[in-house]
Amino acid sequence: MALRQINAITDEATAVDLGCGDGYIANQLASRGYRVIGIDGSTSAMEQAKHLITPKNKHKIQFQVSDVCATQIPDSAADLIVSLDVIEHLENPDAMLREISRIGKSGALILIGTPVRFTEKPLDQYHVQEFYVSEFTMLLEKYFKIRSVKKSHPI
């Protein structure tokens, strides 16, 4: 669903995949023409991601083991920032949103995906917190001008 929001580009722009895991999204972004920086806190995920890069994308993707809330990416470096299914795992989601705000260029496209909350406690034991749509919108509005909030499937 989220990748449908991202068009292919002709000139190389920089995309950051925060919480890139096995690198699937990073590979997709590189195939669309982006130079990609994939960030994840897991060394084993980064090793797996490096092995899964398609040969044509090897020169377009750089992976870094780093905290998604404190990357080594320079200020205003990213044209596109994607973070899918990460924010619900964080004790302090504001820290990641501040980092996204810092590394994104003015007018950067930012895609953040998270499961919609529908129970008092998260059903997934690895989720620190989940958000109702209104809570998530209010959190994002503290940092960004929201173009749209889309649900991938109804509850």
Image (spheres, rainbow, N blue to C red):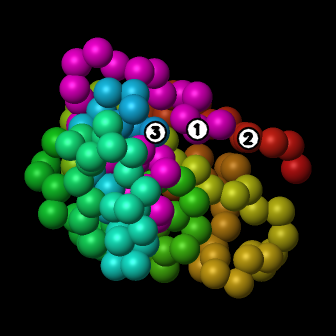
Q: Is residue 150 above or below residue 73?
A: above
User: In the rendering, at what x and y percent does residue 83 appear?
Assistant: 46, 53
User: In the rendering, at what x and y percent does residue 26 appear?
Assistant: 40, 47
Badge 3: residue crowd in 10 Å (few <14, some 14–19, many ≥20): some
Using the rendered image of the protein, determine whether residue 57 is visible from the camera's viewpoint: yes
Using the rendered image of the protein, determine whether residue 78 is visible from the camera's viewpoint: no
Viewer-proximal residue among 152 and 12: 12
Highlighted magenta segment, given as a residue range:
1-27
Q: Which residue is mark 2?
A: 152
Of pointers 3 and 1, the one earlier in the residue sequence: 1
3D distance between C-alphas at marks 2 and 3: 19 Å
Of the numbered discs in the image, which one, if any, rests on residue 2? Answer: 1
Q: Is residue 45 above or below residue 14?
A: below
Q: Secondary structure at mark 1?
A: helix
Query: Residue most toward the right?
Result: 155
3D distance between C-alphas at marks 3 and 1: 11 Å
